[in-house]
Image (cartoon, rainbow, N blue to C red):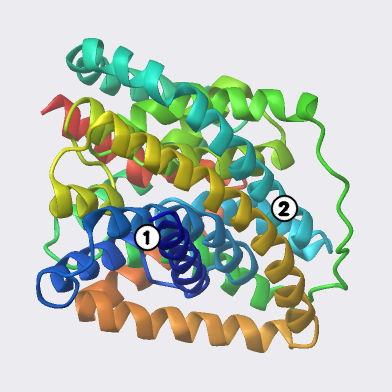
Amino acid sequence: MLIELMIALLLGVLIGTSTGLFPGIHINLVGAFLVSISASYLYSIPVIYLVTFISAMAITHTFMDFIPSIFLGCPDADTSLSILPGHELLKEGEGYQAIMRTAYGGLYSVFLLVIFAFPLSFLVSKVYLLIQKVIPYILILVCITMVLSERKKFKAATVLILTGILGMCVLELNIKESLLPLLSGLFGSSMLLISINQNTKIPKQNITFKKLGFRKLIRPLSGALLASPLCGFLPGLGGGQAAVMGNQIARTDTKGFLVLLGAVNILVMGFSFVSLYSISKTRTGAAVAIQSLMGNVNSNILILILCVCLISGILSFFLVKTISIKFLKVMEKVNYKKLSIGIIALLTVLILLISGLLGFLIFVISTATGMYCISLNVKKTQMMGCLLIPTIILYLI
């Protein structure tokens, strides 16, 4: 049985690596596909192996997802913010540093997940309803703090409100994967078009990395640990919202923010499994897939999932370390202007295939909005209003 579990885990790492590196494939899509074929083609496989596979795939995908986001500007809801500091570091020859900081955040967070999973499951089961009532006011406070932290407060508020209205309009539309065109436009193609206009060239990348000491990680990891449970247990909240809240708590610098992002996404994914165990609620596609296969999980299954998260997280860290170097060596040989045009074309095709013509229209509008917001010279995290404001309204209604 142990050998079969390890095979399922390694297959999950392999598939998660593939899906994480390919722009536009979200882990929710993979989970839904797996559930849809399980009754027809996977019925003979014991459920415990499928649970192991899904858990390993989800964690690995979350580690790998930062590579196309930072290097190519192809974000999803959880990695969109990584483009902001990651792209700047890439233009300075420090793209490898950006990726490794997200990987270190993820690596330390799998250990934090194992340590805090059961205490948090007990706590949340007692105060879940209370947390639901206060979350919109916490998010309002976060928005106010974000605006007040800027020198150009009126412009910051303009960006927050403008993107918030755009996010509300988009999320009201009945299209598949509505966040794909919204976030790809705001955080991806807008920055790529500006780089093309400025004739940006990618310098030779520094692929040496000094191991981060735990002392430098305390603040971003603390912010991630405090914010992630809210988003791992509550509906409508994801890695993007958790990162914004965590950063308001930790007040990290640019490089620390990348560590926080890496930690947040792993913790949100991990806590979604804990949510399934403690309050029988699903918050991610991977958790939905597990619930569809076996119903609610018991403590033994949760322990298995946590062990799988730990092992696959360690393996994924070293895979990111290796793959990102090879990725950068290829990028150094490519004309960045042509690469950027190719990425925008790829995003366009993906959006047309997944979200249709209406999705493409959203992509165009979001791109124009992103370029305008960037021109106002405020922190680009203000554009997270596209997720924060709709979430606030969702909880207040």
Image quadrant where one finds the N terminus: bottom left
Q: Are marks 2 and 1 in contact (CB under 8 Å)?
A: no
Q: Residue at x 35, y 47 (%)?
A: 386
- Disc 2 residue type? Met
Mark-to-mark CA distance, 2 and 1: 25 Å
Q: Residue at x 88, y 47 (%)?
A: 210
**Which residue does the numbered mark 1 point to in the structure image?**
53
Q: Residue at x 67, y 23 (%)?
A: 219
- Disc 1 residue type? Phe
Q: Residue at x 53, y 71 (%)?
A: 21
**Which residue does the numbered mark 2 point to in the structure image?**
100
Relative depth, front residue between 163 and 287 = 287
Estimate the x, y position of residue 86 in percent, counting from the top left. Answer: 67, 55
Q: How many numbered callouts?
A: 2
Is residue 67 placed above or below 113 in the rendered structure?
Answer: below
Rate crowding at label 1 as few (under 14), some (14 to 19) or many (20 or more) other CA atoms within 10 Å. Answer: many
Judged from the image, the secondary structure of the residue bearing numbered disc 2 is helix
Q: Is residue 149 visible?
A: no
Instruction: Left or right? Give the position of 364 relative to 370.
Output: left
In the figure, residue 125 lies in which quadrant?
top left
Is residue 335 placed above or below 206 in the rendered structure?
Answer: below
In the figure, residue 12 lies in which quadrant?
bottom left
Estimate the x, y position of residue 199 in percent, counting from the top left. Answer: 74, 78
Image quadrant where one finds the C terminus: top left
Is residue 338 placed above or below 386 in the rendered structure?
Answer: below
User: Quick one: label 2 or label 1, which is nearer the N terminus?
Assistant: 1
Estimate the x, y position of residue 268 in percent, counting from the top left. Answer: 41, 38
Judged from the image, the secondary structure of the residue bearing numbered disc 1 is helix
Q: Residue furthest front?
A: 1
Q: Which mark is residue 62?
A: none
Instruction: Left or right? Give the position of 41 relative to 223.
Output: left
